[in-house]
Amino acid sequence: MIYETPEAWRTAPQKRILLFGMSGLGKTHLANLLRAKGGWFHYSVDYRIGTRYMGELIADNAKRHAMQVPFLAELLKSDSIYIGSNITFDNLAPLSTYLGKPGDPAKGGLPIEDYRRRQDEHRQAEIAALLDTSHFIGRAERLYGYPHFVCDSGGSICEVVDPDDPEDPVLTALARDMLLVWIEGSDAHTAELVARFDAAPKPMYYRPDFLDAAWSTYLQDSGLPPEQVDPDAFIRWTYARALAHRQPLYAGMAKWGVTVKADDVAKVRSEADLTDLVADAIAVRT
């Protein structure tokens, strides 16, 4: 770890952390809080994916749908209107909408092969965005004068790394520059996230082996052909399984850094609170 003791962390002139864990447990809350207090550069991996690496794909998908409307098609072909995504740190809907859901086209579903292709595009983009972190650490300091840096990673970070490989290229690069901080949820948090997702299912990224197994099992259990699968029903069915699948991956990643509890993260109201929370986590680890 780049901060080997609580004191090294507290006195560091440049504090650099990467927050990871299930979506909805406070990563962006902490990053926004630190950015608002000043002195911290907030790097959002999902924002980088949706702008730098998948921005054109997202915009082209919106144009493809617009081209189905004759009025809009004529305006697009004459360059009379512009279509782009308005993705922000707090609104990643353009990215998740592009990822889509597999199943019945009449219900907004994608053919499974198109879905797999978009999943692979996201995988490549996420790896690239994570590896860009080092560049942005330097850029934030040189260009803007920010001494501190917080990387707000996506919930799917655990899907693109191998925490059991001591030479994993992504984790090695990240741990070299930052302290990895796992925000660990409880069973109650998991139940809450599942209920929230059930009310408003959103597209997610899954590693290929997990997705293939889930899709195959769902088709077998439901008895439905792929083109008749309800997209929302499939991703609801998959979500709780995905959380269980990710938990040991997050725990493996935590060996590269430290762990804090989601309940404690919810109590953080200042930079000083976070400094204390991370210092305590380093003390436990060391």
Image (cartoon, rainbow, N blue to C red):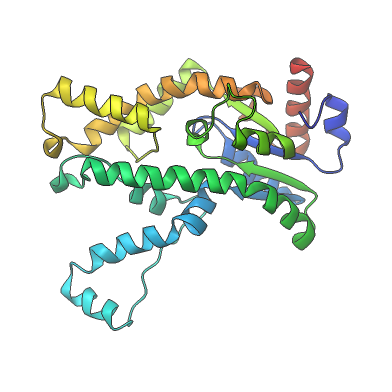
The residue sitting at 30% across, 45% down in the picture is 100
Could you say which is closer to the camera, residue 196 or residue 82? 82
Question: Would you place residue 69 above or below residue 251 in this image?
Answer: below
Task: Provide residue 5's location: percent of width, then percent of height.
Answer: 84, 24
Could you say which is closer to the camera, residue 256 or residue 88? 256
Residue 15 relative to residue 166: left or right: right
Task: Provide residue 156's location: percent of width, then percent of height.
Answer: 48, 35
Q: In which quadrant is the C terminus drawn?
A: top right
* Residue ranking furthest to the front: 167
Q: In which quadrant is the N terminus drawn?
A: top right
Question: Would you place residue 27 above or below residue 41 in this image?
Answer: above
Q: Quadrant of residue 74?
A: bottom left
Task: Provide residue 109's location: percent of width, then percent of height.
Answer: 21, 44
Could you say which is closer to the camera, residue 272 or residue 260? 260
Q: Does residue 261 appear in this view?
A: no
Residue 279 relative to residue 7: left or right: left
Number of marks in picture: 0
Residue 128 relative to residue 200: left or right: right
Task: Provide residue 132's location: percent of width, then percent of height.
Answer: 62, 50
Question: Would you place residue 63 above or below residue 26 in this image?
Answer: below
The residue sitting at 54% across, 30% down in the picture is 21
Residue 133 relative to residue 237: left or right: right
